Amino acid sequence: MKDRIKLIMEKENLTPAKFADRLQINRAIISHILNGRNNPSLDVVTRILGEMNYINSEWLINGTGDMYKEGYKGNFASVEPDLFHQDTPDMGRTAEPIEKSKEIGFKQLNNNSQISEKDVIMSYKNNDRKITQIIIYYDDNTFEVFGPHMK
């Protein structure tokens, strides 16, 4: 089974670290499997089949049949999705439709008009939505959360 897992990683263009991250398991588990120290556990096999539902379970477990399930077209799973490209393949998952947010414009003010502080504050009060937190994700799989400071 170790060789079949290596083949999956090769076909999917995944390093052992990215493969472990995609399966949401400890990277050491994949390292131990690939080095022959441990055999894949049932959890690892079910995660592979759950995350890559186009892999033939008979092939993965027994080595019989084709690697991919019948009807699988192409190796679109090798495209790594990101936050900025909405047209990336969904890797066999069904996705909820994405609802685009409406942009709210600001009214252009006449340069001659006088704006009081009260007018500015009132315009902010009319908006019901408030930012509660901002999360920044980095390419090294870390993130930072920014939000209002709690007292």
Image (spheres, grey):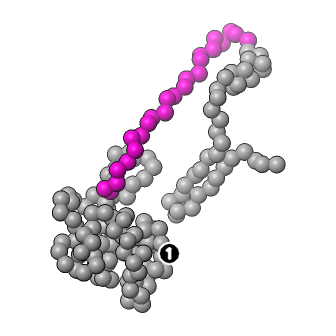
Q: Residue at x 59, y 17 (%)?
A: 107
Q: Residue at x 39, y 81 (%)?
A: 40
Instruction: Give the labeled residue for mark 1.
Output: 26
- Please state the total of marks drawn on the protein image: 1
Left or right placement of residue 42 versus residue 56 in this view = right
Q: Position of residue 77 (x, y in %)?
A: 31, 60
Asked whether residue 16 is in view, the answer is no
Against 112, residue 95 (above or below) is below
Q: Position of residue 99 (x, y in %)?
A: 44, 36
Against 130, residue 77 (above or below) is below
Q: Residues within 10 Å of mark 1 (few under 14, many from 20)?
A: few
Q: Residue at x 78, y 20 (%)?
A: 117
Left or right placement of residue 41 versus residue 3 in this view = right
Range of the magenta residues?
91-114
Q: How would you classify the magenta stretch by its main secondary structure? A: loop
| Along the line of sight, the residue nearer the viewer: 110 or 36 | 36
Q: Verify whether residue 51 appears in magenta.
A: no
Quarter of the figure that contains the N terminus: bottom left
Amino acid type of the residue that numbered disc 1 sits on in the rendered structure: Asn
Q: Secondary structure at mark 1?
A: loop
Q: Residue at x 27, y 72 (%)?
A: 57
Judged from this view, the residue extending furthest toward the right is 151
Asked whether residue 126 is in view, the answer is yes
Q: Position of residue 82 (x, y in %)?
A: 43, 53
Left or right placement of residue 103 versus residue 52 in this view = right
Against 151, residue 41 (above or below) is below
Judged from this view, the residue extending furthest toward the top is 112
